[in-house]
Structures are given as C-alpha cells and as structure tokens.
Amino acid sequence: MTRHLHILFLLITLSFSYALKANSELQNPVHSDSAATHEELSVTDRVVEHIMNHVADANVNHLGTIKEEGKEDHHITIELPCILYRKATENQAGKWSFFMSSKFHHGHEAYEGYKLDEHTGRVVDANTGTRDTFYDLSITKNVFNMLLGFIILSIIFFTIKSAYVKRQGQAPKGIQAFFEPIIVFLIDDIAKPNLGDKYEKYLPYLLCVFFFILINNLLGLVPFLGSINSSGNISFTMVLATCSLLLINISGNKHYWQHIFAMPGVPKWALAILTPVEIMGVILKPAVLMLRLFGNITGGHITVLAVVGLIFIMGEYATKMSGATAGTLISFPILLFVNAIELFVAFLQAYIFTLLTGIFIGAAIEEHHH
Amino acid sequence: MLLGFDPMSLLTPDLGLVFWTTIIFLVFWLLVGKFAFKPIAKAIKDRDQNIADALTAAEKAKAEVQQMHSDNASLLKEAREESAKILKEAKELKDSIVAEAHHSAKEEAAKIVANAKIEIDAQKKAAMAEVKNEVSKLSLEIAQKVVGRELDSTKDQQNFITSLVDKLN
C-alpha cells in the first residue's frame, strides 16, 4: 500500500513539475527582438512551438522562468559549455571558440560572433542567424543528460562490481540486490536464449545498451533536470543503432553472409529479388531500431507536453481562470496516466532495443546445420 | 504560421550530438562494459556455478547418509539374525547334549540292571544247585540213618532220592 502511495506521489510531483515548467515558459515567451512576430502566434502554435523546441536539442538547459510584475524575467537555467568551430572562409581562417552559454545572457547578448536563438535555445551565427557557418560540438542539453547518465551508471556499476568482488559467492545486498535481478533477467532472457554459448562475449554490450538507454529515458522523465529528450533524439538512436549494425555484421559468420548473398535452396532467378531484399535488411534492421526508440521516446515527450499544453489552450479560449481550471481538471488525470505509461515505456524500449540487438547478433553468429 | 523551429530538424542527425553520443557511449562501453559488467557477469556465473555445485554436493551427501543409514540398519539386522541363530544353535546343542546324556545314562543303567539280573540268576542257579545237592546229600544221609544198613545198593538209592528232590522243585 505504502509503495503504491509512493508511486502516486512521485507521479503527482512529476506532473506538477511538468505543468510548472510549461507554465513558466509559455506564460513568458523567452524572446525580445522577435517579440512582434511571436505575439501573432496563437496559443496553440506557441504550445506546438514549445513542444517541438523541448524535444529538440539546445545549447542551454532551460528549466523555467520566473516572471514578476515590473521586474526583468528571471530564467532558471543550467548553463552549458559551448565548443564551436567557425568554418574557414576566404577572408578568415577557421577558429575555435570555447565559452559558457551564460555569456549570451539568455539571448540578450552576442559573444564571439555567436548568439543564442531564444526560441530554440541553439547557438546561431550572430550575423546570419543560421547554423551553417560553424560546427557546433558543444555540450548541449542532450549531451549534458548523457554525461549525467554516464556518471550515474558508472558510480552504480562500479559500486556493484566492488560489492561482487568483496562479497564473492555471497547473496547480493543493497544496490547490488536491486540491480542483480535486472542483470540476471537480461542474461537469462536476452543473452542466453539468443546467443547460446557465446553470450558472455556480447553480454557487456547488451548490458551497456540497455542501461544507457534506460538511464537516458528515465532522466528524460525528471522535470527539474529539464526532462531532456536525449534518448528520443535521432542522433542518439542513430549512434546506438550504428554500433549494433557494426557489431552484428562484424560478428556475422559464413552462414550469415551466405544467407544474405546466396540463400541456400532458392532458385537462381529468385535470388535476383531476394538478395537485394536481404542486403536492404542489413541496413533496415538497425534503422528500425533507430526509428522505434526515437519515435517512442519523442512521442512520449510530445504527448506529456501536449496534455500540459491543453491547460493553456483551454485557458486562452475560455475566460482565463475557469478555462485553465477546467483544462487542469481534464489534463491532470490524463497526465498521471501518460506519465505512468512513459515510466513503463522507458523500461520497455530499452528492453526491446536490447532484445532485438541480441536476436540480430544471435542470427548472425548462429551455426546452421542443414 | 511563423514557428521558431524547423520540423525536419527532428529527423536530422546533429553532428555535435552524434560526436558526443559516440564518444560517451564508446567510453561507457569500454569502461563500464569491460571493467564492471564483465566482472559482474562473471561473478554471477561463478556464484550460480557454486550454488549448483553446492546443491549437487548436498544431494550427494544426503544420498550417502541415506546409504549409510540403510547399511547400518541392514548390518544391525544381520547382527541380530546372527545372534539369534547362535543362540538357537547353542540351545539345540545343549538339548542334544542333555538328551544324549539322558539316553546314555538310561542305557548304562539298563545294562547294569541286566548284568545284575544275569549275575543274580547265575548265583541263584548255583545256589539252587548247591541247595539241591546239599538236600539230596542230606536226604540220603537221613535216609541211610533212617533205613540203616538195609539199603545196600547205595547207588540206586542215590538216584531215586535225586529224582525225588528234582520233583520237589
């Protein structure tokens, strides 16, 4: 019972935080110079814009804005390092810039020829307003989220490792006991059935993929860290899918390649169709992994924010207060539900990505006996 | 509609993010995968093996104890049977010895009695013969004294008296 209450409390806290964050950002559109154009946007468009900017990457981790009558807006942000390389032109050699995003003063000032776009939170060229004159290798909010996840996972798993070394052969305890069932589940449910005797070779990769996706999914659900959509970014899923692609094809044995280029027992004319399909399959399998994770996590973020946005849309179209109240009453239960689903999806998608990677590697290293 | 975002940017991989994701994930894989997950997986496998071995050993020990137990029981049973057999044999031996003794004593006694009877009979016969002889002699003397000299032919008289005595029996 208490456990259920805890979970409920957690979800309520999460929902409130989302609502507060969206509130602070929507009520106070963070822009100055383009204010005129922005005012013309309807509240629905602003909600859409906010959502799309939220799920995309940004050079500053914007947590919220506090607005007071007669005072300048106070932005709550986690400032991030900018690492920029201006492309060489005829007049100018290429140039590296390293500075913190706080130099932009929330988009009010330009720095070293760069400025911060206030809608997207991305660094743009101060002159052209575009991003194609330089390379951006900054620690963006997604990179920040990944680094945070990396640090958390490293601490957790090195602690667990030392527990296993120290308490060799004994029953697990504490954090070790919390993670062991998950690890054992992955070993028994993904690694062993798909990879057979060679599972130990691929197990570290599978565990890494699972926990790396999981921690990014879960950190993406923490509003006071900015609910960063790192595992729902196409770049993130692309890198992981590429690693899986390389691992699958490097591990592939003679039979695997034989089945791709010359499926045994298939007439010659049919191979003309089958082989291109199989070759496409090599790329498509990881591409589907990439798109599935991207779609599920980004979709989850969009859903949560859309439900929060409902409050502001209804507030705009009815009289402000009553509409917002009705919107809150409607969206709050939905938000609780969607958040619970998202929590589940965080685990599910990490599991599915790992499972399919395991299955694909298993198919590539399987010894066929015809 | 002037929106501050490019919808296609959602589906466009970003160079910087790809770069950092690759570095972070590869470092994570090399560091945590190699130095944490590998030892953890090994420790779990070793422990599973240990537990399996311990269970097998326990099962074996249990079977051994069971075996010993049944061995003991059968040994005990055998010992009991042996002692019962020995006791039975001893009893039989005793009985047979007693019976033998009894039998031989009886036989001995019977023999002694028979011998005694024979002896008695012989003695009796001898005594009888002597008595008869004595009586016939005495009778003859008495008759000689009674009849006197008239009886000359002693020989005939003797025979006559002997026959008389024989008749007396």
Image: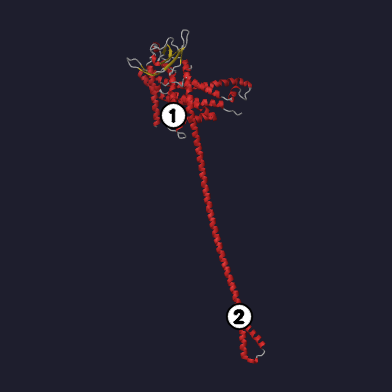
Quarter of the picture containing the N terminus of chain A is top left
Q: Is residue A300 above or below residue B73?
A: above
Quadrant in which residue B121 is drawn: bottom right
Could you tell me which chain the residue with mark 2 belongs to? B
Q: Is residue A328 above or below residue A166?
A: above
Q: Is residue A189 visible?
A: yes
- Label 2 to label 1: alpha-carbon separation: 134 Å
Residue B107: percent from left, percent from top: 58, 68
Crowd class of label 2 (few under 14; some 14 to 19; many from 20; radius 10 Å): some
Q: Residue at x 55, y 62 (%)?
A: B95
Crowd class of label 1 (few under 14; some 14 to 19; many from 20; radius 10 Å): some
Pick the front one: A370 or A101: A101
Question: Does residue A259 appear to the left or right of A155 in the view shown?
Answer: right
Quadrant in which residue B109 is drawn: bottom right
Residue identifier under label 1: A159
Considering the numbered disc 1 on the image, is that residue within a helix, a strand or a loop? helix
Question: Does residue A73 appear to the left or right of A203 in the view shown?
Answer: left
Residue A63: percent from left, percent from top: 39, 19
Pick the front one: A65 or A157: A157
Q: Is residue A349 visible?
A: no
Question: Does residue B71 appear to the left or right of A307 in the view shown?
Answer: right
In the drawing, what numbered circle is on residue B128? 2
Quadrant in which residue A95 is drawn: top left
Q: Identity of the amino acid at label 2? A: Met
Q: Identity of the amino acid at label 1? A: Thr
Could you tell me which chain the residue with mark 1 belongs to? A
Image coloring type: secondary structure
